[in-house]
Image: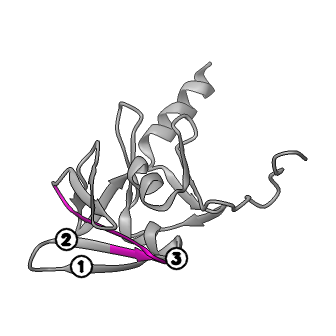
Amino acid sequence: MLSALASVLAAASQPASLRIDGQRIVSDVPPVTSIKGEAFVPLRVVAENLGAETDYDAKTGAVELSRGKDTLRLRAGDNLATMNGKRLLLKHAPFAVRGRMMVSLATIARAFGSKVSYDRPRAKIDVMTPGMVEAGAQQDGE
């Protein structure tokens, strides 16, 4: 019982690890998690690892992500974003940590169609590109 408590405390004291398509991603600003079980990730590092280009407008504070024909535009502190010019209401407004914009996993899922998960006990965040299968994982029907 003591070792189980120690592992829980160790996991709680370390930031969650981030994996995209099975590859561990290291960022200068780690993911942020809440006691409510929500996870927020650094937008630029996730977007670029999902194949998006990012652009920051210093005048407006807006960040624009482009991937293929899709464009997401959002600002820190604003629950309203646009996706391909259409209004998109975010449950959690993006926020800044040490100069990096942090967004919820739900925002990543909506913007990129990615499958996202946060395993709180293991302090592990996974983002999977649509159609990608993690190495060693079985595909549906196998």
* Main SS of residues in magenta: strand
Whether label 2 touches label 1, CB < 8 Å: yes
> Observer-nearest residue: 102 or 112?
112
Residue 126: say if magenta.
no
N-terminal-most mark, 3 or 1 = 3
Viewed as shown, does residue 46 lie left or right of 35? right
Residue beneath label 3, please? 51
Identity, as a three-letter code, of the amino acid under mark 1: Tyr
Q: Residue at x 54, y 56 (%)?
A: 114
- Few, some or many C-alpha atoms within 10 Å of disc 1 (few <14, some 14-19, many ≥20)? some
Tell me the SS state at disc 1.
strand
| Image quarter hosting the N terminus | top right
Residue beneath label 1, please? 56
Q: Which residues are magenta?
A: 65-77
Point out which mark residue 121 bears.
none
Tell me the SS state at disc 3.
loop
Q: CA distance from mark 2 to mark 1?
A: 6 Å
Identity, as a three-letter code, of the amino acid under mark 2: Ala
N-terminal-most mark, 2 or 1 = 1
Q: Residue at x 48, y 61 (%)?
A: 112
Q: CA distance from mark 2 to mark 3?
A: 19 Å
Tell me the SS state at disc 2.
strand
38, above or below 109, in the image: above
Residue beneath label 2, please? 62
Q: Position of residue 138 (x, y in %)?
A: 84, 50
- Few, some or many C-alpha atoms within 10 Å of disc 2 (few <14, some 14-19, many ≥20)? some
Q: Quadrant of residue 83?
A: bottom left
Q: Quadrant of residue 3?
A: top right
